[in-house]
Image: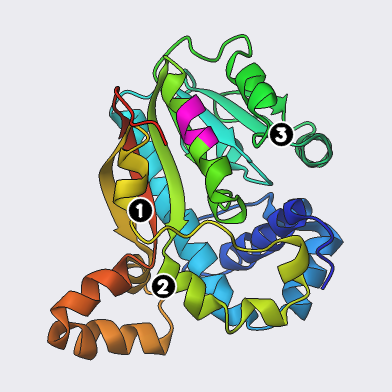
Amino acid sequence: MSIAHVSDTAHWVAMYRASESDRVDALFDDPYARRMAGDLGASIAREALHGDAIAWGVIVRTAVMDEMILGCIEQGATQVVNLGAGLDTRAFRLNLPSSVRWFDVDLPRVVTHRRACLKGLKPRCQHAHVVADVTDTSELKRALSTPGIGDGKVLVVCEGLLVYLKPDQVVTLATNLNSATAVRWWLTDVVSHMMLCMMGSKWPTNEAAATAPFQFAPRDCVGFFERLGWREEAFRSILDEAVRLQRAPPMIQWWSAFAAPWWPGARENVRRMSGVVLMRKEHGAIAV
């Protein structure tokens, strides 16, 4: 595959968003996804082993996070700080209040590509790019101190980021976000240790394993973040949402309809294998 750096996976994800947008029953419309994906995204999607097994989860995750972001804004969020933004175009495609301030934060090469693709387009809200490596503490703090950030109630968004970080990097990120006064909410996707074990039978067969390995998959997601001062407010299971949104593959549909009711204990473990979690900051984080 053509993945030379973890940031290249953003092109892959953008290609899946483009394919979904082409459907007559599309869950969302991302008219900029194909230009964002470019030839690299098309190449990765075309060559990816088990691509269909990955695509539906990416599509459902995108749709669910769209809903939850809009929900947070309805609840009072006035700013969105999108860390590791990749090639996300929500500031240009979602029906956002014009008063919302949106900051897309990522590496220099990603921001350069974003600016080239979005040149001349009008965002739905007040939008700015911020160049920073969010895994570097000093750069993250500098990004969070960018003029304009912190002038309101901040929602931090991380999509497709944490799974590629080492646990200690997630601890550092969570701690730094907790110490940022204006940050109220944190929305991110997570996978469990069970999911990591299941993906292990497929992902390592990809050359991407060397450049974009899955590293963060806690056994106890709720407890992990609670110790760092983040309380779970809502969890949306990708499996449950896939059934609701009619994007679930046959095996998931069979499990939800027939098998899950017979295994109540196992059902909760399965539904929390992959999901989107909204957390609210609590003070008094436990040192780790």
Mark 3 or 2, closer to the camera: 2
Query: In the rendered view, would you say 119 is above or below 243?
Result: above
| Residue ID for mark 3 | 133
Q: Is residue 113 left or right of residue 11?
A: right
Give the residue type at disc 2. Met
Sequence-wise, the earlier of marks 1 and 3 is 3
Instruction: Give the CA separation, mark 1 to mark 3.
Output: 24 Å
Tell me if residue 173 is in the magenta stretch: yes
| Mark 2 crowd level (few <14, some 14–19, many ≥20, 10 Å Cα) | some
Tell me if residue 132 is in the magenta stretch: no
Instruction: Give the CA separation, mark 1 to mark 2.
Output: 12 Å
Give the overall secondary structure of the magenta segment: helix
Helix, strand or loop for disc 1: helix
Helix, strand or loop for disc 2: helix
Magenta-tinted stretch? 172-176
| Residue ID for mark 2 | 194
